[in-house]
Image (cartoon, coloured by chain):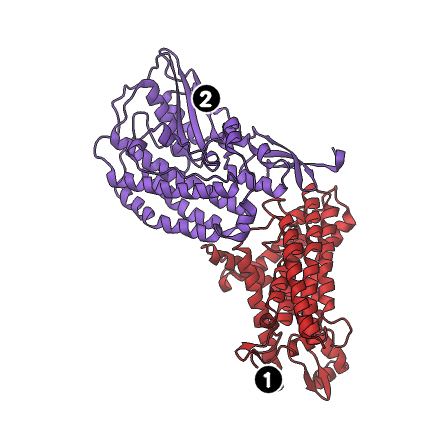
Chain colours: A red, B purple
Amino acid sequence: METLASLLHTSPATAWMAVKVLMAFGLIMGIAPPLTWAERRGSAMIQDRIGPNRAALFGKIRILGLVQALADGVKFFFKEDLVPPHANKRLFWLAPLLAFVPAMLGFAVIPMGRSFLSGGTEYHLSLLDPGNGMGMLFPMAVGAMAVYGILVAAWSSNNKWAILGGMRASAQMVSYEVGLSLAVIAIFMVTGGYDPHEIVKAQQGTFLGVLPNWYVFRQPFGFLVFFVCMFAEANRLPFDFAEGESEIVAGFHIEYGSMKFALIGLAEYGHILGASALITTMYLGGWGIPFVADHGQIPVIVTFLVFLTKVIALCLVFIWVRWTLPRFRYDQLMNLGWKKLLPISMANLLYFAYRMRG
Amino acid sequence: MFKNEEMEINLGPQHPSTHGVLRVKLRLDGETVTHCEPIIGYLHRGVEKICEDKTFFQGQVWTDRMDYVAAISNNLGWAESIEKLFGIEVPRRARYIRTMLTELNRISSHLLWLGTHALDIGAMTVFLYAFREREQILDLFEAFCGARLTTTAFRIGGLREDLPPGFLKQAQAFQDRFLACVDEYETLLTENRIWKKRTVGVAPISAEDCIAYGVTGPVLRAAGVAFDIRKAFPYAAYDEMEFDVPTATAADTYARYQVRVEEMRQSHRIVQQCIDKLPEGPVMAKLPKVLKSEVGEVYHAIEAPKGELGYYLVGEKGSGNPYRFHVRAPSFVNLQALPKMTEGKLLADVIAAIGTLDVVLGEVDR
């Protein structure tokens, strides 16, 4: 780290910050386009089709159709950027950013690998170092901000279908956030803190001798609630009401085209990645290797790859679910949120609170 | 417009889930539908009037374009109503082949319904599975008459040609794998909790209302009325076939789903009987070169995939074309029940209701 810093004529802290920013940002921007490819090829596999495999660089390099993601991006750049005359222009411009930025911000506190010592300083593989006072509350808070992007997009479009989508998004939001928070509190309680680094460390070793000591096994009901709510938060089928392709056409982004549409699309994949990273950190042991209690001797890069593997596997689950399940009706999510998820997470919380008494 | 904070919105005519150019004018209170008014006519071509200027032989081409996903059923109704008008006896082999093709067509029509209906409700994968099998059926049609969609499959008095060589083998290949495919769709949907949540109790219409509106077909049978023209007034070779008329009592979207899935199995059974018992003999009756009608009228109804498809023809003395032609289109009649099924429900239920009615706008507007 010192060498790198001296080469760049900066302090180690600054150099490390730059590395981390590149890592957090690059992870999202690097995975999101291949994720669109995985979504299309994955859905093709599920649906007994072939999927995009024609796009090629210089007419030769196809990489299993991965070039398609690139071609899509280029296409979006060259599309006419149309702002409908009846829209509120400023907000119409702002909304894709409001959708996109929270999706990226959630990554700020997620530890992507083991912390390590170098030159007497401890370096952490998360954008914000532990002890920043926000911990896991930060991704929760900014994740919930994403609904503003949808609402602003819906409202500024001045379109009836968009308004319906926005209404659905706000109604949906209230109904799952409560259950979600209670599920998370149970984890904070058992861990004794809401710092992601502590949460990951609390999940190392084995549980009952045969399972990894992950919260998914220790708090299965909490995980269930959290997992379901993450689908709602990422606006994915079976909870993609705000978009509701076959019902309200495209919902909140009906009037969007060009790069603004691409940003909204990227935000969706950003949310999937963010949700996967959250689930990984909270319930699947983060960067921890299953059954390993002490990660002191394991190379940092291995822990990073472990984290990445878990996140990508979860992203694939998101894709798999989308192409398998039908959509709920939006009032049914509210029922589910208030009448099922909330009591489950409440019971989960009370159970662990009872176990921790005196 | 915004009286009582209600919003008026046009669902269609360009909308992914209106299955064509149906426009539904909705008044929404939040997302609750307070008023629903289907507006039709965007695909009106005047098929009935055009057919009055065409000879009896030519008219069939226009029937393809009504319910274009079940063209063979339409062809059958047209051919049989004219045969009834002229008292033409169709050879037994031709009737068997007609029955077989019509039942294959029913399967393909139901497959299209299943795929699009599931797609409307958000289950996107069933669509491609259903189309995979539908493709096989369309290949059979292509082998038989050269066309896949607008078939003009039959001739008045029988068939233009006998089955092509290898057709029965190809049909048997389809038959052998189809039942497993139906099971596959069912594993995706039948016990799926979300599918049930979206369909059970959604868009109900009672048997009394069905009869009052004239609703027929699977929608009526899902309300518990075992009315099937193939059993009640057998035509083609249905009197020689063994099959059940599936019914359900719940009268909701899920019941209609169950009825149609079971109908696919029954159609499969009929096709199998046609293949096994296919008689030898000619496929065309002896007919004069030109058909000149007497004064007379005929109403002939068949059980199309959507319901009772009736052809009303009036003959004029010495004329080569019908004096009056009218179609009782099941989609048109069934669509009338949409407001009854959806008012007071949610927008998402309107989508489910349009899907479950299985309307084809070519037939509604004609």
Q: Quadrant of the C terminus of chain A?
A: bottom right
Residue at disc 1, secondary structure: loop
Residue behind mark 2: B326
Q: Chain of mark 2?
A: B
- Residue B168's disc number: none
Residue behind mark 1: A298
Task: Name above or below for residue B110 compared with residue A313.
Answer: above
Tell me the amino acid under the disc marked 1. Ile
Task: Name above or below for residue B136 compared with residue A7.
Answer: above
The residue lying at 43 percent from left, 44 percent from top is B261
The residue lying at 60 percent from left, 74 percent from top is A214
Tell me the amino acid under the disc marked 2. His
Inspect this view and state whether residue B285 appears.
yes
User: Spatial distance from mark 1 to mark 2, Cα to Cα?
Assistant: 81 Å
Residue B210: horizontal and vertical position, in percent? 51, 31
Residue A217: horizontal and vertical position, in percent? 58, 71
Inspect this view and state whether residue B120 appears.
no
Q: Quadrant of the N terminus of chain A?
A: bottom right
Residue A213, quarter of picture: bottom right
Residue B310, quarter of picture: top left
- Give whichever of A67, A294 is nearer the camera: A294
Label 2: how many Cα within 10 Å (few below 14, some 14–19, many 20+): some
Q: Is residue A227 left or right of residue B88?
A: right
Residue B362: horizontal and vertical position, in percent? 49, 32
Residue A198: horizontal and vertical position, in percent? 69, 77
Q: Are marks 1 and 2 in contact (CB under 8 Å)?
A: no
Q: Chain of mark 1?
A: A
The residue lying at 48 percent from left, 36 percent from top is B223
